[in-house]
Image: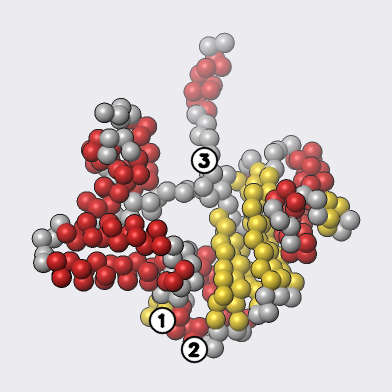
Amino acid sequence: MAEITAKMVSDLRVATGLGMMECKKALVEAEGDFAKAEEILRIKSGNKASKMAGRLAAEGIIGSYVEGGVGALVEVNCETDFVAKDPTFVALATAAAKAVAIANPADVDALGAVEVDGVQVEEIRKAAIAKLGENMTIRRFVRYQTEGAIATYLHGAKIGVIVDYAGAEQVGKDVAMHIAASKPLCVSKDQVPAETLEQERKIYTAQAAESGKPADIVAKMVEGRVNKFLAEVTLLGQPFVKNPDQTVEKLLAEQKASVKAFAMFVVGEGIEKKVVDYAAEVAAAAKL
């Protein structure tokens, strides 16, 4: 039997939003397997287990650049929010996004060698580090080149969206804003990863089976839950943020528009941020 530590229980609580005792029981039942314990809790509670996972854990900004049918989105990170607002750091993000758009680099390493206004992105980065005194990294980027149109939306500087679409300019702006607010996984249900759909179906089946209803009713319950899930996670199935009585799919049809692809970056998403206990540091220093 694997040892169930307080940290394991705490991590599961953060990921699921459920009580400590529930999380401990699930971990015991799963013999310490975190993913299995998370699944157990979802089956028992019907809760979306990962709703609190992936909290922002790093500082920085999202930069964007659009010219004609080419657009780019880039995440650039630093150590503090104070530096993230500095004009020198903002200029680095802008230069990086422009470099991605004009040169289409293969990866972040290749991006560093791209010149913007005669200066390599890597040199711009090093100069910013020297001036501001913090480590800075270009974490990721996405680039679209289309015969249609490109729309971008930045919510502050922490959330960025880029959309490859066809239609009026206002539609592109509205859809980009909707994506930032509603965070769909993909454009349509046929793009939902098979493994994601299978996992959801497995959980819904286990939940429905506990109802004690006949097999044919259980099957209908599962399909209903699956269809609801697909509507929740796909752009086309979601209620439009400006008019919840209308889905995005209906909005696009009404405007004779379409969306080919989109991407959304959230600063620090998926990066674990070290929590500093300043009181403990001061207390330790006092003992020296």
Which quarter of the rendering shows the N terminus?
top left
Camera-nearest label, 3 or 1: 3
Query: Who's the residue at 78% across and 64% down the image?
Result: 102
Compare residues 61 and 107 and report the one nearer the observer. 107
User: Mark 3 and mark 1: span between their CA atoms?
Assistant: 37 Å
Q: Are marks 2 and 3 in contact (CB under 8 Å)?
A: no
Residue pointed to by mark 3:
272
Disc 2 residue type (three-letter): Glu
Q: Which mark is residue 218?
A: none
Quarter assignment of residue 97: bottom right
Q: Is residue 238 left or right of residue 73?
A: left
Mark 2, Cα crowd under 10 Å, few <14 / some 14-19 / many 20+, is few
- Judged from the image, the secondary structure of the residue bearing numbered disc 3 is loop
Is residue 2 visible from the viewing direction of this image?
yes
Q: Measured from the top left, where is residue 260 in percent x and y?
A: 57, 75
Residue pointed to by mark 1:
246
